Amino acid sequence: PNVPAAVIMALRELPTTCTVVVGLESSGTRYVARELSRLLGDNCTAGRQPKGPRASAWSAAGCAWDGERPPCWEGPDRQVVQHVSLPFGGFCGSGTAYVLQRTSICHGSTEAGRWFLNLSSHLDQSNCRAVVVTREKVFTRISKVTQHCRTDVQRNRSATLAAANASTNLSAAKVAAVRSLRSDAVREEEIGRQILREAMASAPDRILVVPYDELEWLREHHWGRIGIFVRGAPFTAGLPRFRSANRKWLIGGRQRMDDMLE
C-alpha cells in the first residue's frame, strides 16, 4: 500500500538517536549534556570552550552549545541531545513549579517559568532514551541553593547566604537564611526524585544512570557506558577532561554542608 507523503516526511524528521539528559537540578546534567553533544558531533572538540583566537573557529564548527540555551542540540545524522533538569527554568522559591507531561524541547519555544518534566510520559511519547545523572545529596543541595535559589523576593536572603558562604563561622541569622533557602530546595528535590523513580520503574531499559561524583576518577568507564547506551559503541577518543565541582565544598566548607543536610 502507498504510504502518505506526510507520513514519510514525518518519519524522516525523527532523530536517529535522541537522548535526554536529566537529573535533579545541580546534579551535573548540563555538563553531561554539553559534553555528550561534543562527542557525538563530527567536528566538535571535546572539553572546555577555548578562549581567544580559537573561540570563533570552535563556535563555527557547531560546538558552542552551552547545554542549556536552547535545551536541545541537533547534530549530524539527526542526532539529538536534550537537557532538562528537575526542575528547569526560573529560580526556586519563585512559586510552585508545575509538571509537564511533555514539552517540545527542540521545536518552538520552551515552557516559561519553572517546571518539571514528567520523564515517564516524555519517554512514552517520544523515541528518546534517558541518561539520568546523580550526585551526592549534600553537593547537589548546596550547589542548588547557591546557584538556583535566588529571586527578587529572596534578594535579602540570597545576600545573607553569599555572606554565609564567605565564612565557616555562621551567625544565627545567617544559618536561618541558609535553612530557609534549603527548605525551598528540599521540596523540589522530593518532586524530582519521585519523577525519576516512576520513570525508572516504567522504562528501565531506556534509562542509564551515571554518577557525576565518579566522572573525574572513572572517566573512561562511564563515558564508555554512555557511548554504548547512546550509539552502540563506547566513546574512547577525545574524552572530556573533568574536575569535579565538589572540591570547592570539601575545602573549608564543612559547616555549610552540614547546614544543608540538617
Image: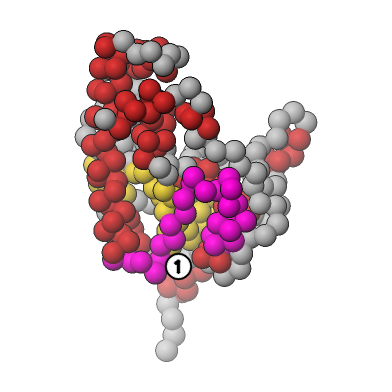
Instruction: Place residue 92 in its image quadrant.
Output: top left
Q: Pick out the residue farthest to the right.
A: 53
Q: From the image, tell me which residue sits under label 1.
A: 10
Relative image position of residue 146 (x, y in whole percent): 40, 25
Name which residue lies at 70% across and 52% down: 238
Determine if residue 241 is in view: yes
- Of 87 and 103, nearer the camera is 87
Instruction: Place residue 189 in its image quadrant.
Output: top left
Name which residue lies at 37% across and 36% down: 138
Instruction: Give the magenta range.
Output: 202-227
Vertical order, 198 against 67 (above or below): below
Whether residue 110 is in magenta: the answer is no
Identify the element where label 1 is drawn.
helix
Whether residue 219 is in magenta: the answer is yes
Name which residue lies at 61% across and 64% down: 234
Determine if residue 128 is in view: no
Q: In the image, is 145 to the left or to the right of 38?
A: left
Q: Magenta stretch: dominant SS?
A: helix
> Mark 1: few, some, or many residues within 10 Å (few <14, many ≥20)?
few
Q: How is the image coloured?
A: secondary structure
Relative image position of residue 35 (x, y in whole percent): 58, 48
Instruction: Tell me which amino acid carries mark 1.
Output: Ala
Q: What number of labels is visible?
A: 1
Name which residue lies at 53% across and 43% down: 31
